[in-house]
Amino acid sequence: MTVFEVSSLNSGYGKLHILNDVSLTCGTGDLVAVLGPNGSGKTTLLNSIFGFADVFSGTVRFDGEDLSRLASHEISSRGVGYTMQIYNIFSALTVQENLTISAVMGHVPDPRKNVSNALEIFPRLRAFLDRKAETLSGGERQMLAMSITLVKSPKLMLLDEPTGGLSPLYTSKIIETVGQINRDFGVSIILVEQNVRKALQVAKKAYLLVSGRIIFEGTPSELLAKEDLLRLYLGAMRV
Amino acid sequence: MALIEPFTIAETLIYASLLSLMGVGVTLLYKTSKVPNFAHASFVTLGGYVNFSLVSAFGWNPYLGLPIAFVLVGGESLLLFFLVLEPLRKAKCSVAFLMIATLAWHIAMLGFLGAYADSLETLLRIPSRNVILSRLDFTLAGLPGIFYVSVTVTVVAAVALYFVIERTNIGIALRACMENQNLAAAVGINTTRMLGIAWFLAAGLAGVAGALLPLWTQLSTGSGDTLIAAMFCVSILGGLETLYGAFAGGLILAFAQIVGTTILAKTVGLWITPYQPVVPLLLMAIVLMTNPKGIGGMKVWRRFK
């Protein structure tokens, strides 16, 4: 069953038109990978869904409701979580404050329990609860960023390059965890990722976004079979 | 004769307290809205006239008007924020545009306060310019009540502000908004509401400072304007990125402006006294050129934090 649907989306920033007629669907509990070269509009797609970009036309529907008319915090309250690529943690707050404020603002019944659940997924963060988030390493920051979204018990998670700039070890760990969140918690996920092969290992469906247009939609195996597309737009696939 | 009389120290602490209450608001608004708020001058003047009106028209004790001034001036700032600044912010206007909007609001308020003062004079026959309420103040141990009240109010405000900002969920949400409003919205914080709270608090504190002003010095429709450079100086001295630095900034400026000028007057001559208003501008220039992050950017402050 489709829980999330983007239809004929045209969006950008001010006069800059970036996405052209983008359509995308995500079923309940699905993990959808959105792939594409740098500058193809992947982040703009997530920003448009979350109200951070200007939507010129088209609709973004979640659970039957049009999100394009809602403020970002209202979209969050509907059960959509967004982990941005950069500036995705509050560096001046402690790790505990980062998690608490997200859980409290997410109006979850038991914020402490949700924080504890998130820390079970990323146990490494337990040791840093009282530390300012700015002191964390790149991988730990990414774990915190995902935890901030996770403590809200979202029904849909938008993840923008969660492995960006991380070592291969952290990359594998993060992608594994994304798969785990999707499997164990039944959270629908839209994953924007540069590590194509890793993303396709956990995705159920994939989209290829090039120059603001969707040029492929299908299963990961179908995309992997399209060697011309992979070579042309995704270059030497990062492992 | 001592170089500095105890009364001068008391005067300095009163001035430091009032400046701190004003300056901390300038910093709070800069940190949350990124706007240097020129309307802070009218917040101070309005607070003064609210208290003066309650005292003159209803015979209130001059200290009873403080909470009323806090709420009314806070309310004025909400009008400015929701009617002017928020629509401009949503239209993605630049910070410079927002700053000019606060200046325009201030000029409009100046007109309103002038008309209000005229009305008091013509309709109620209450002298309303260059007025002072110190004759209604109490005295304790040879010092005026304003000394005890202004220092106490400032200390209480600093502690309360620290408690709210550092220890409550609203405070964490405010700090989150100060750092990254998009991320704050992404975690579900209503950033508009948070900014509204920041404007209310900042203006309320300026209103309280304004309400205390006529107990210390003359109140006129331009009182806030004469202090605007000092307010920005306090904020810059404390560090625009450090909320609590404004309290230290207020103390430093007050000592430089009152104690410093007094010492200079006694050593180089009285001719120096008229240059007292230049001190905030001079200090502001020195800080911006040598240590733009102010006290908050200094290692010693970071260690203290």
Image (spheres, coloured by chain):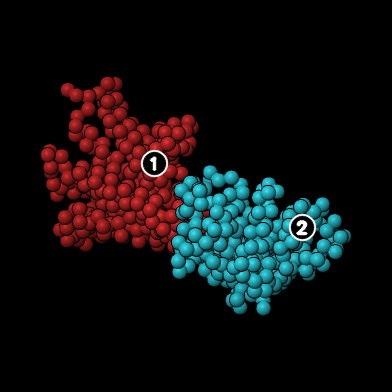
> In 3D space, how far apart are the residues under numbered discs 2 and 1 (Cα atoms)?
51 Å
Q: Nearer the viewer, residue A83 or B126?
A: A83
Q: Which chain is cyan?
A: A
On the question of residue A69 being in view, the answer is yes
Estimate the x, y position of residue B224 in percent, counting from the top left.
33, 47
Mark 2: which amino acid? Arg
Q: Position of residue B257 (x, y in %)?
A: 31, 33
Is the N terminus of chain B in the top left, top right, bottom left or bottom right quadrant?
top left
> Horizontally, is B294 left or right of B187 in the view?
left
Q: Residue at the location (39% across, 38% down)?
A: B304
Query: Is any part of residue B104 visible from this angle?
Result: no
Residue at 72% x, 68% y is: A204
Quarter containing the C terminus of chain B? top left
Circle 2: element type: helix
Chain containing the residue with disc 2: A
Q: Nearer the viewer, residue A218 or A46?
A: A218
Asked if A80 appears above or below B200 in the picture, the reply is below
Residue B212 spot, x, y in % from top left = 24, 49
Identify the residue at horizontal 19%, vertical 24% (top origin).
Answer: B2
Q: Are marks 2 and 1 on the same chain?
A: no
Q: Is residue A38 left or right of residue B115?
A: right
Q: Which mark is residue B245?
A: 1
Are there few (<14), some (14-19), or many (20+) residues within 10 Å of tag 1?
Answer: many
Q: Position of residue A18 (x, y in %)?
A: 71, 61
Res A33 → quadrant: bottom right
Q: Is residue B151 left or right of residue B228?
A: left
Which is nearer the eye, A182 or B65? A182
Q: Nearer the viewer, residue B76 or B127?
A: B76
Tell me the amino acid under the disc marked 1: Gly
| Residue at mark 2 | A197
Looking at this view, name the residue that lies furthest to the right: A228
Chain letter of the red region: B
